[in-house]
Image: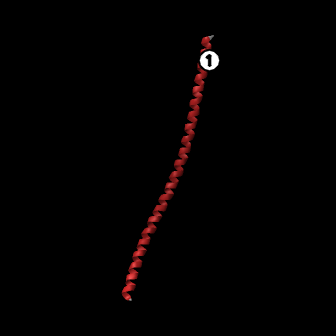
Amino acid sequence: MSNSLDKTKFIQQFEAIVKAIKGNKAKVEARQVEEGRKRVRLIGQLKELMDHQRRYVAVVKQFKIEVKRNETLLAQLKSIT
């Protein structure tokens, strides 16, 4: 009788361990999915920020060209007057 009771107890403990492992696995998989979504979102933000940076650099470059042009025109205006 004791042997049968021990086997039943062992099986119940083993099933509890398996259930806990499955629960942990589900949590890890859910976290992995969420991290994947977060990664995709962050990659999108990075691309958007890089695009803003490219446009900013282009505008600054154009601004420098216009400043030089303005300085040249001012120098020409001063030499005329």
Could you tell me residue 2's position as x and y percent? 61, 11
Q: How is the image coloured?
A: secondary structure
Relative side of 78 to 28, left or right: left
71 versus 17 height, above or below: below
Q: In percent of the image, x 61 and y 22: which residue is there? A: 12
Q: Quadrant of the N terminus?
A: top right
Could you tell me residue 77's position as x and y percent? 40, 85
- Along the line of sight, which residue is nearer the eye, 79 or 54? 79
For residue 21, what is the image quadrant? top right
Q: In percent of the image, x 54 and y 48: which residue is there? A: 38
5 versus 70 height, above or below: above
Q: Quadrant of the C terminus?
A: bottom left
Circle 1 sits on which residue? 8
For residue 25, what is the image quadrant? top right
60 versus 38 height, above or below: below
**Amino acid bearing label 1:** Thr
